[in-house]
Image (cartoon, rainbow, N blue to C red):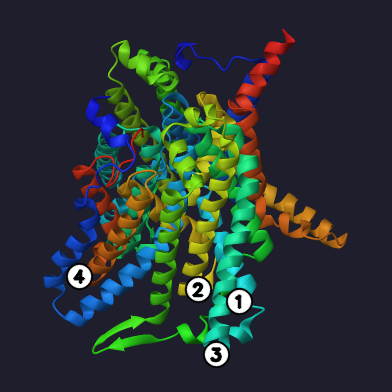
Amino acid sequence: MTILSGDPPRGRALTILLILIVAALALAPFLFHGAKPLNVAAKTCVMILLVASYDLLLGYAGIVSFAHVMFFGVGAYGVGLMLYALGPSWGALLLGLVAAAALSLALALAIGLFSLRVQSIFFAMVTLAVAYAFNVLASQLSDLTGGEDGRSFKSPDVLRPSFRLIHDKVFGVAITGKILTYYLVFAVVVIAFLALLRVVNSPFGRVLQAIRENPFRAEALGYRTMFHRTLATCLSALGATLAGALFALWLRYVGPDTALSFSIQVDVLVMVVVGGMGSLYGAIIGAALFVFAESYLRDVMGALSEAAAAAGLPLLPALFHPDRWLLWLGLAFVLAVYFAPSGIVGALRATEKAER
Amino acid sequence: MSALDAGQSLPRARREILPALTPLLVALAAAPFIGSASTFVTLTAAGLAMGMMIFTMASGLTLVFGMMDVLNFGHSAFIALGAYAATLVFLPLASWGSADSFALNLAVFLLAAIAAALLSAAFGFVFERLIVKPVYGQHLKQILATIGGAIIAEQLLYAVFGPAQIPLSLPRTFEGSFVFGEAAIEKYRVLATLVGLTVFAGEMLVLNRTKIGLLIRAGVENREMVEALGYRVDRLFVAVFMAGSALAGLGGAMMALYRGQAHATIGGEFLVLCFIVIIIGGLGSVGGSFVASILVALIANYAGFLAPKLALMSNILAMVAVLLWRPRGLYPVSGR
């Protein structure tokens, strides 16, 4: 219990689901063979950290930010460009991570101090504008960032696919650098997630929730809401930066489409809301569901689309076209906002309560 | 609330003139750096036209926010819808656009503008009823619900119109430029400026000279009081939302024509600009967003000429500068 900071998932169905997801991720290289499942698993891990850090802001502090993916991008570009410029070494990796974290902190502090004084709506707009400007800047400084093409780089040699930890196969799987990278990503995400769980269950986390529920009252009780909100912004920015660094390391590539694009921000919002705002476990479920849907729902929809076209139905083939999968998740998103504000986690907990 | 605040919220309060002059000041400040007079005229005229197109979109957003306290992230969908609506008129009537007749050319443009506005308004009605109505007064849910609505709407647009760009060509009369000495002013920009000014004048007239406008302004100040006086504020809300959507569609159609292509990404792109404009103008202020649109477009144009690398950042820098000077925008609306 202490490792979960005294905040277990609560609810049998939820616990079982979480254990299944975490176990699948932990054993992914041995359970599933081939490159695609491992990519899906790695992306899920990264998204869990990204979404959990966003939930700290949205679900716990009640602040809507559109600059979260910007911090993700800072992390990805920090590590990617440093490895690209200095060559593949652990020193460069660390230097990139530290530089990215410093930049993220400075940006988060500036945005927070500048715009958190006013309504939450104002913060939402300012972050949107800043994130947009950052995207433009990243593609403008193409000498440094590689522009739209991005940069491919080499990771330190232990993490390369050609590296072999031991010559013999373990359970029929060669322990390559790729698998080591996967476990590096997995371990960092687990540690960071537990750290975030610690943060939201600390007195600081309680104050954040108090501010979310009633800012005036929290202020009247003597808490400096401005300080707490800014600190939450900084912490969540650091989480996103770390997630970005891991994602770049996994892909051994950094570019606007994988690290900065605004559609990632929308994806993160969908994951948080569908998974469940205000509970970090929602991040695990939301991210797992989303990445799985992104990777495999297309196939299902493609089949549906063809079936609808064969039946001669109008418009339906277009609606079920594999590229329209976001339409259905958008629908789920809106329904979740209206009818299940605490997402899948809330729904699973509620049924548990009703049974008792 | 001090006596001073109360005085400011009375109608016909003293209008501050300095914020309205900022675009002029920027133009004067930039002039010496640009040097050549003809370049300056070209840039300024282009900036004015761009400002008017942005204003058309942004005023819808600020109207909806000012009146209903709803920040509509789905505004982007209406902009994109307007752009596609223009293609619905222009493609079947391509012969009108390419005809060598001013009347036909103008007719096809006006038809496209009207179609964009009407289609967006109709869609706005549905959007308001389905997406926005259940979450009035809850900012966080509003933001999330309207974003969800925007995702769905964008995907539907792709499903209906296909994922590729749809090319559009300007009517013949509006191609090319008026040339004065060395300064060239594109004809379409003149048209866009005229449309923008008409929209501004229309909004100002309706808001300040009609009973509906009076109710809207009263609703912005104090919704409960207007309801207590027996007016159906919720119907007024739908009307304002439809008007805001229509403006977004009109702006989207004009911008799509200017760019020569329609694509759903136009929505998100200009939504960001709209936000910057209404923040600079003061959330909810139509006059403020008018000044801010011109300011933003002029700064972007001058910056694009003087320091191209900075141009796309210039909007943000302008916003920061204005907010440092006036933290609630150029023309803050009382009670916000």
Q: Do labels 1 and 2 share a chain?
A: yes
Badge 2 local density, few (<14 within 10 Å), some, or many (20+)?
many
- Label 3–label 4 contact, CB within 8 A: no
Give how far across and how far down residue A25 sits, in percent.
57, 34
Task: Give coordinates of residue A309: x percent, y percent.
Answer: 82, 61
The amino acid type of the residue labelled 4 equals: Leu
Counting from the top left corner in percent of width and height, residue B189 is at: 39, 75
Residue in view at x 29 percent, y 15 percent: A223
What is the secondary structure assignment of the residue under circle 1? helix
Instruction: Choose top left, top right, bottom left or bottom right for residue A120.
Output: top left
Give the SS element for disc 4: helix
Residues behind callouts 2 and 3 on a single chain: yes
For marks 3 and 4, give the one nearer the viewer.
Answer: 3
Whether callout 1 and callout 4 share a subunit is answered yes
Secondary element under disc 2, as helix, strand or loop, is: helix
The chain identifier of the residue carrying mark 1 reads B
- The residue positioned 24% from the left and 77% from the top of the image is B41
User: Identity of the amino acid at label 1?
Assistant: Phe
Q: Which mark is residue B306?
A: 4
Q: Earlier in the sequence, mark 2 or mark 3?
A: 3
Q: Mark 2 lies on which chain?
A: B
The residue drawn where x is 37% and y is 14% is: A217
Which disc is residue B257 wearing?
2
Q: State the residue at coordinates (31%, 45%).
A: A93
Q: Nearer the viewer, residue B59 or B303?
A: B59
Foreground mark, 2 or 4, reads 2
Q: Rounded to the nearest whole Å, what is the CA distance between mark 1 and mark 4?
A: 36 Å
What residue did someone put label 1 on? B90
Q: Please report, as a chain letter, where disc 4 is located.
A: B
Q: What element carries label 3?
A: loop
Point out the frontmost of discs 3 and 1.
3
Quick check: marks 1 and 2 in contact, CB under 8 Å? yes
